Image (cartoon, rainbow, N blue to C red):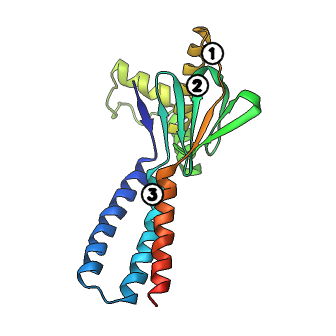
């Protein structure tokens, strides 16, 4: 079963930006005024390429056989059995064969999110003689306990460790990671550069 983790905020804002760009491109084409329109298109193209590469493309994907780290310009395919250690700071860092480290772009842990998680894990003091907060069910309380003091990045890091340990127990082969270039991201950057060059030549 495939599971994908990414920054929801960045993903939503990225699609909002694309909708904004689509409207503006239609308007610029419908009311084309020469170089000014070309410059505006070039700016929109450059910003859109940046949004795609940084906000829309990055993702951490779990498949049955491997961890897939989609970073801005490259994709790493790492078999679960090859994962040696996982540490979580601002990002999730996955150590694998040869002392190499795969830094996952998403999900990331901000200082604000980590402080919020620490506050969530602190025991609450009951005020007054009577309870005013609703009582959680057993499953709800278990979910609260599981996430106590942890950010989303911490939780994903734990899932990576668990899958790696399960793969080693099954004696799966620890093959080297495969790294490929992100041709879609490169194409977006090339298209943006082409728009900038076209805007300059239209001058």
Helix, strand, or loop for circle 3? helix
Q: Circle 2 is placed at which residue position? A: 79
Residue under the point 41% across and 47% down: 8
Return the residue nearer the eye: 151 or 23: 23
* Disc 3 to disc 2, C-alpha distance: 27 Å
Marks 1 & 2, CB-CB < 8 Å contact: yes
Mark 3 or 2, nearer chain start:
3
Mark 3 or 1, nearer chain start:
3
Helix, strand, or loop for circle 2? strand
Q: Is residue 172 visible?
A: yes
Q: Circle 1 is placed at which residue position? A: 173
Query: Measured from the top left, where is residue 18 in percent x and y?
Result: 34, 62
Q: From this view, report whether residue 13 is shown above or below residue 70.
A: below
As drawn, which residue projects farthest toward the right?
99
Q: From this view, report whether residue 112 is shown above or below residue 32.
A: above
Query: Measured from the top left, where is residue 131 in percent x and y?
Result: 35, 30
Q: Residues within 10 Å of mark 3 (few under 14, many from 20)?
A: many
Residue under the point 31% across and 31% down: 134
As drawn, which residue projects farthest toward the top?
170
Q: Is residue 119 left or right of residue 36?
A: right
Q: From this view, report whether residue 8 is shown above or below residue 29.
A: above
- Label annotation for residue 52: 3
Residue under the point 35% across and 89% down: 34
């Amino acid at each position: 079963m495939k599971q994908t983790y990414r920054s929801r905020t960045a993903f939503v804002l990225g699609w909002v930006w694309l909708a904004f760009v689509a409207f503006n491109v239609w308007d610029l084409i419908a009311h084309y005024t020469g170089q000014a329109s070309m410059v505006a298109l070039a700016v929109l193209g450059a910003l859109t390429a940046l949004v795609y590469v940084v906000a829309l493309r990055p993702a951490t994907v779990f498949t049955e056989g491997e961890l897939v780290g989609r970073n801005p310009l490259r994709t790493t395919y790492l078999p679960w059995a090859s994962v040696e250690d996982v540490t979580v700071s601002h990002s999730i860092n996955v150590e694998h064969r040869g002392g190499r480290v795969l830094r996952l772009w998403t999900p990331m842990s901000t200082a604000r999110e980590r402080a919020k998680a620490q506050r969530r894990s602190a025991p609450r003091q009951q005020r007054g003689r009577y309870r005013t907060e609703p009582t959680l069910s057993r499953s709800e309380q278990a979910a609260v306990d599981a996430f106590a003091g942890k950010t989303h990045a911490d939780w994903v890091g734990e899932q990576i460790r668990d899958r790696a340990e399960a793969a080693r127990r099954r004696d799966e082969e620890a093959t080297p990671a495969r790294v490929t270039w992100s041709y879609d991201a490169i194409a977006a950057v090339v298209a943006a550069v082409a728009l900038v060059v076209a805007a300059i030549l239209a001058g």
